Image (cartoon, rainbow, N blue to C red):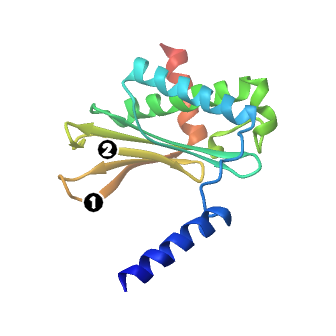
């Protein structure tokens, strides 16, 4: 019985190797895609240096062209809605500015100029290893509306502290910067 298994395995392995059952190389990336990843990588580094952002996850919705960038950051600090709004808007505007300013990647963009609706950005606020208990614990943009969520207790449900359109948040931040 063992001899049969060995013989079958010896005959099967070369057959599988010749029939193409092996790892195939990935198709080469377009230069614009490589450039886009470089832009986002520089953005992530700068956000860490300037604001203490830590990358949680990143993704690109890209079939023929770039439809969406998805990025999540963690911050190890407590923030009010006011502070969180300012961080979120400044990060979003910086990323959009970098993507839209680069002429090399424009052919890759599904929509130009790239807008907040093409960026899925989440910010998570921690105190130690747990969600921040005071102020904003989690914020995200969905259907052009920013949601500011709080967490009651270590395992409690999230509750909405505030909700506003991205445009409203941008106007608030711009008016605060103009008055200071």
Residue most toward the bottom? 1
Q: What secondary structure is found at the residue carrying circle 2?
A: loop
Q: Is residue 159 left or right of residue 172?
A: left
Judge the density around disc 2: few (<14), some (14-19), many (≥20) Cα neighbours within 10 Å.
many
**Residue toward you, 72 or 83:** 72
Residue 93 appears in view: no
Q: Is residue 66 left or right of residue 152?
A: right
Judge the density around disc 1: few (<14), some (14-19), many (≥20) Cα neighbours within 10 Å.
few
Where in the figure is residue 92, as x and y percent of width and height? Answer: 56, 32
Where in the figure is residue 116, as x and y percent of width and height? Answer: 62, 40
Residue that badge 2 annotates: 137
Q: What secondary structure is found at the residue carrying circle 1?
A: loop
The N terminus is located in which quarter? bottom left
- Residue 81 tag number: none
Tag 2–tag 1 contact (CB < 8 Å): no
Residue that badge 1 annotates: 157
Q: CA distance from mark 2 to mark 1?
A: 11 Å
**Residue toward you, 34 or 146:** 34
Q: Which corner quadrant of the image does residue 157 belong to?
A: bottom left
Where in the figure is residue 94, as x and y percent of width and height? Answer: 58, 25
Marks 2 and 1, the one that precedes in the sequence: 2
Residue most toward the front? 3
Residue most toward the right? 107
Residue sitting at x 60%, y 48%: 144
């Amino acid at each position: 019985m063992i001899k049969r298994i060995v013989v079958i395995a010896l005959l099967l392995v070369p057959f599988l190797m010749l029939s193409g059952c092996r790892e195939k190389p990935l198709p080469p990336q377009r230069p614009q895609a490589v450039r886009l990843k470089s832009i986002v990588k520089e953005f992530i580094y700068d956000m860490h240096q300037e604001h203490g952002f830590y990358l949680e996850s990143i993704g690109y919705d890209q079939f023929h062209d770039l439809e969406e960038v998805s990025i999540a950051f963690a911050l190890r600090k407590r923030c009010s809605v006011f502070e969180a709004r300012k961080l979120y808007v400044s990060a979003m505007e910086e990323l959009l500015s970098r993507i839209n300013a680069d002429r090399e990647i424009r052919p890759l963009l599904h929509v130009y100029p790239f807008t907040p609706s093409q960026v899925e950005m989440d910010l998570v606020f921690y105190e130690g290893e747990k969600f921040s208990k005071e102020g904003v614990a989690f914020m995200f943009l969905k259907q052009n509306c920013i949601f500011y969520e709080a967490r009651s207790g270590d395992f409690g449900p999230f509750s909405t502290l505030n909700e506003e359109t991205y445009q409203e948040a941008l106007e608030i931040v711009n008016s605060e910067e103009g008055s200071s």
